[in-house]
Image: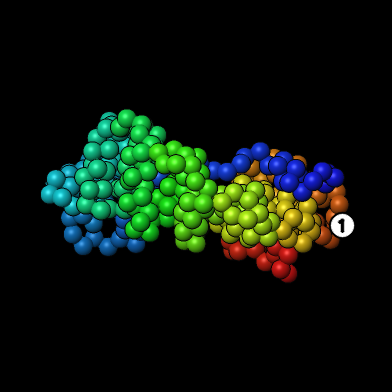
């Protein structure tokens, strides 16, 4: 590894903190989150979800639209997703925003968060960071981790709210403790850089580790750098190789060159161990390494 300072070495990571408040990030498959997985049809709404899950969007619309008109918030957000994705209907973000608004006005946290995402990105509504922050806050106050992360991002960047790293850290932490990998990743940088918290490389490594364990390839890359440099964790080339390997397998393009660089400092037995641990992590999602073997 380079002989530059610890902070400089970590900065070879080219990504930086994540700000991911867009509708695309938010609308990952909320209909599934509303209960399609393992669904047993028990009523009209469930029948609509079943049709949606089978790709029969015409039937889903026929069932869900009357329910949405009657005020069913889950049906309203389902219609919002259908219009946002253009499934069985022409894509219509303005219509999606209207259905999100109706569900959000009833206190539906997913709708509030997704409506905030639409205001953030200006999709279906005029771009309005203040409105985005207000809707994110409504969902965040109800404990919705995705909205907590998004609100933290707004505070981090001073969009729609005063720039406030302490408030950003607070919202990231709420989301991070619920397992939001993006919030965990950003908390790692806040502790690394001393933004909103005292600088603490050990705490940074801990948050990066939480994010990495959830499959965040950027966190895996940074954690590999921390282990290769011994920053916040004991220097451990086996752990570094494993995390670089996993990050590269996840699509982070710079990771393989760092894996190969650290491999030049390792014995064949150490490389084999790192590869075994990476295979185990992929199989179980929970590595047996990280300086804790």
Q: Percent from the top left, x then y, of residue 206?
A: 63, 60
- Whether residue 40 sits left or right of residue 200 in the image: it is left
Q: Which residue is mark 1?
A: 267
Q: For this rendering, which residue is in front, 125 or 72?
A: 125
* Image: 286 above or below 253: below
Residue at position x 73%, y 69% from top?
293
Q: Percent from the top left, x then y, of residue 156?
A: 51, 44
Q: For this rendering, which residue is in front, 193 or 27?
A: 193
- Whether residue 175 sits left or right of residue 31 in the image: it is right
Q: Give the colour scheme shown.
A: rainbow
Q: Please give the count of numbered marks on the rendered protein.
A: 1
Residue at position x 42%, y 52% from top?
148
- Whether residue 158 sits left or right of residue 72 in the image: it is right
* Image: 81 above or below 213: above
Residue at position x 35%, y 34% from top?
128
Q: For this rendering, which residue is in front, 142 or 218?
A: 142
Label 1 residue SS? loop
Q: Percent from the top left, x then y, of residue 205?
A: 66, 57
Residue at position x 32%, y 42% from top?
115
Residue 245 showing in the rendered view: no
């Amino acid at each position: 590894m380079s002989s530059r300072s610890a902070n400089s070495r970590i900065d070879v990571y080219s990504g930086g903190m994540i700000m991911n408040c867009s509708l695309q990030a938010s609308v990952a498959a909320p209909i599934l989150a509303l209960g399609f997985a393992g669904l047993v049809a028990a009523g009209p709404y469930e029948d609509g979800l079943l049709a949606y899950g089978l790709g029969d969007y015409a039937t889903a619309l026929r069932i869900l639209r009357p329910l949405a008109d009657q005020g069913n918030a889950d049906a309203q957000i389902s219609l919002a997703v259908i219009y946002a994705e253009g499934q069985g209907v022409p894509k219509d973000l303005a219509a999606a925003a209207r259905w999100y608004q109706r569900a959000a006005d009833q206190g539906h946290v997913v709708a509030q968060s997704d409506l905030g995402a639409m205001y953030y990105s200006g999709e279906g509504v005029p771009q309005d960071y203040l409105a985005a922050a207000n809707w994110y806050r409504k969902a965040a106050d109800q404990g919705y981790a995705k909205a907590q992360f998004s609100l933290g991002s707004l505070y981090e960047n001073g969009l729609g709210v005063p720039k406030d790293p302490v408030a950003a850290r607070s919202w990231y932490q709420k989301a991070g403790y619920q397992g939001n990998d993006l919030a965990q990743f950003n908390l790692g940088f806040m502790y690394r850089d001393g933004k909103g918290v005292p600088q603490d490389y050990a705490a940074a490594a801990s948050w990066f580790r939480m994010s990495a364990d959830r499959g965040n390839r950027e966190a895996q890359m940074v954690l590999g750098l921390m282990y290769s440099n011994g920053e916040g964790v004991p220097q451990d080339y086996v752990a570094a190789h494993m995390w670089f390997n996993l990050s590269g397998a996840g699509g982070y393009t710079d990771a393989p060159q760092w894996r190969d660089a650290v491999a030049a400092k390792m014995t064949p037995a150490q490389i084999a161990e790192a590869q075994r641990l990476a295979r185990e992590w992929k199989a179980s999602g929970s590595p047996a390494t990280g300086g804790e073997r």
